[in-house]
Image (tube, rainbow, N blue to C red):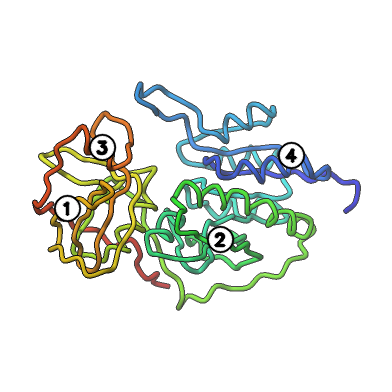
Amino acid sequence: MTSQTYKIAFFGSDEISLPFLNFLNDQCPFVHVSAVLTQPDRRSGRGRRMASNAIKTWAENHSISCRSPEKPSDLECDWLREQNIDLILVMAYGHILKKSFLTLAPAGCFNFHASILPKYRGASPIETAIAMGEDNTGVTLMRVVHKMDAGPIVDLESLKIEQADTGKSVRSKIADSCVPLIQRNIQNLLVRNINENPQDPVLATYCRKINKADGHLDFSAKASHLVDRIRAFRSWPGCGLLIDGQKFRIGSAKSLENNILLDVGVTQIDSDGNVMIGTGEGILILHELQRPGGKMLKSSDFLRGYEFPVGQTLESYDMAQLVIPTKE
């Protein structure tokens, strides 16, 4: 690289971006993150107080100019143009950008997407990959086009999803994987010396936004499938059992395939004090449970303070489809 300092604008709202932002800020002397666009302050926590997201806080702590409009407009585009931005990087921003933003920076606009594209375009690639039982995922660096996550691919970083992984742990792995990805590509991005490979639209799938209803479980499904959903949604919305109108949250579980005969949704307790539930294929064994307003406990400890309905049939609820084909 020459002695020139390149100006980068970053669009994002999630702490998943912090490792690579810190890399750019601390270890790339030829780069200056000079502008940030992020989501507005939102109410959060039990007190529902207004709070800034992690990216706005990061920008303020590093004295970086930051704006947080409800929706990016021509005002923000003009603001960035006045700063002579060389490159725009995006991750988990939450908006489809207008063409004026995509053509603003001479080096282009590129996004870090938390899946191996073209699989799992859309809003929830991390949780959906786990819930679908994937063994691998990763992060893809791609050029931003107007269509969601459909741009040509520059590079990617793969990682393994372990059986013990949850949505939170895979999110942390994705965050760390962004660092070698940007390290390999930042110089070539800035000087516009990159190879871009178009995505195969035939292989494209789309994952929707996760909602509270995704915490429901249908016990007619395979036990292993239910375990994957429990892992994926542990942080939010949390999978659980509805008993007498109350949700008992599941912390961790495993599936068992043996000759134990339990009808779908029927409960039993094993010799270790774990709750067992019959499913469409296999047995769902719950290792951790949490009652409303209580702490997450090992099942054996949980049962000491709660009379669990053994031998009864728990109600199942429809589990909405997480993935749909993408129409080109």
Front disc: 4 or 2: 2
Label 2: which secondary element? strand
Q: CA distance from mark 4 to mark 2?
A: 23 Å
Residue ID at (59%, 63%): 158
Whichever of callouts 1 and 2 sits on the residue coming sooner in the sequence is 2
Q: Is residue 243 above or below residue 174?
A: above
**Marks 1 and 2 in Cβ contact (< 8 Å):** no
Identified by mark 4, the residue type is: Asn
Q: Is residue 324 left or right of residue 75?
A: left
Q: Residues within 10 Å of mark 4 (few under 14, many from 20)?
A: some
Residue on which the image places disc 2: 138
Whichever of callouts 3 and 4 sits on the residue coming sooner in the sequence is 4
Identified by mark 2, the residue type is: Gly
Residue on which the image places disc 1: 268
Q: Residue furthest right?
A: 3
Identified by mark 3, the residue type is: Phe
Residue on which the image places disc 3: 302
**Marks 1 and 3 in Cβ contact (< 8 Å):** no
The percent coordinates of residue 191 (x first, y second) are 80, 58
Residue ID at (54%, 62%): 160
Residue on which the image places disc 4: 25
